[in-house]
Image (cartoon, helix red, strand yellow):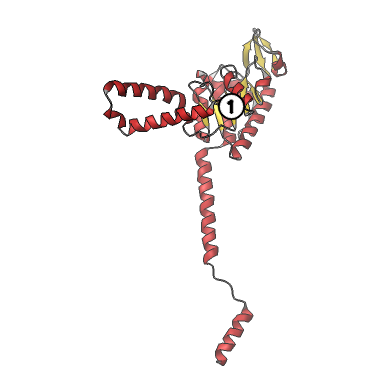
Amino acid sequence: MTKVTLNEMFDNLLHIWNKRGFWNSQMRPFIYGVVNGVHVINLIETEKKLQEVALQLKELSDSGKKILFVATKIQSREAFKNLAEATGHYYVSEKWVPGLLTNFRTIKRRIASYIQLSDDNNNGNLDVLTKKEKAQRLLELEKLEKAYSWLKDMKKLPDAIFVSDWIYDKQALKEAQNLKITSFAIFNTNGSLDLATNMIPANTNAVKSFEYIASVLKTHLGDAKTQKKATFKKVEQDVVSGEKKATRKPRVKKEEATVEATEATAE
């Protein structure tokens, strides 16, 4: 696991917050001071919270729980998309579809429609349509792909969500709260603590800040491909071990062997 250091966080701009006028008094414990009219984060508190959230996410992931990473803010999209793909979790990076959690039954049908339409397009089934009909279907496919392509493997509600910027994706946090789904978020000075189960106080405007946080989380969650190989290797070893045990000849006690030999000679 990566050890978080104050110097690294400072170099990656995690300490810069909003202007002095944009803040919530709930965030006072995480503010170090004001420099040139801008709040500065207490990085000691950020380090504590980052490690705390990372360990909580690791615990969820290690127990087989699925996490949905929500990062629709442009600065955070790439970092958390890569994180989700590398660790085998879900992500939303283009647009939060209202009701994605609270109306998941309907969303599942939309995802199924997207998968079917995508398969029809790949298999050439749309070629039998008129040019106008095909164009309409392709336009619909484009919209569905933008909304659901990264959720096609999500068969049920996630066990937890992580939001890269609480203000950008407040709706996701509210839906998680309504369903009592564990939620995590990165908060700036204007954060509302009652909206998330836990949070990381950090800069929500810099690409470097998002990339650093995502890298720390990745080291805790681990690489999905590596974990899959390790699991497969263990299963393979267990199978081989079982086969060896099954084919091993039973041991005959020395006394029993001597008696059997004596009886055979007497006969």
In the foreground, 63 or 38: 63
The image shows a total of numbered marks equal to 1
Is residue 218 left or right of 193 when viewed as pictured? left
> 252 and 138: which one is in front?
138
Whether residue 99 is situated above or below residue 248 in the rendered picture: above
Q: For the residue carrying disc 1, how many other residues have a C-alpha within 10 Å: few (<14), some (14-19), or many (20+)?
A: many
Res. 118 image quadrant: top left
Q: Secondary structure at mark 1?
A: strand
The relative height of residue 186 versus residue 238 in the rendered view (above or below) is: above
Q: Quadrant of residue 171?
A: top right
Q: Position of residue 182 (x, y in %)?
A: 63, 29
Seen in the image, is 145 located left or right of residue 105? left
Query: On screen, 241 above or below 53?
Result: below
Residue 167, image x, y percentages: 59, 16
**Which quadrant of the view contains residue 210?**
top right
User: Which residue has dot 1 on it?
Assistant: 162
Residue 255 lies, in percent from the top left, at 64, 81
Residue at image position (57%, 32%) is 158
Quadrant containing the N terminus is top right
- Picture residue at 31% right of the left edge, 29% below the top: 126
Picture layout, residue 259 above or below residue 151 = below
Front residue of 96 and 246: 96
The disc labelled 1 sits on which kind of residue?
A: Phe
Residue drawn at (60%, 39%) of the image: 62
Residue ranking furthest to the right? 29
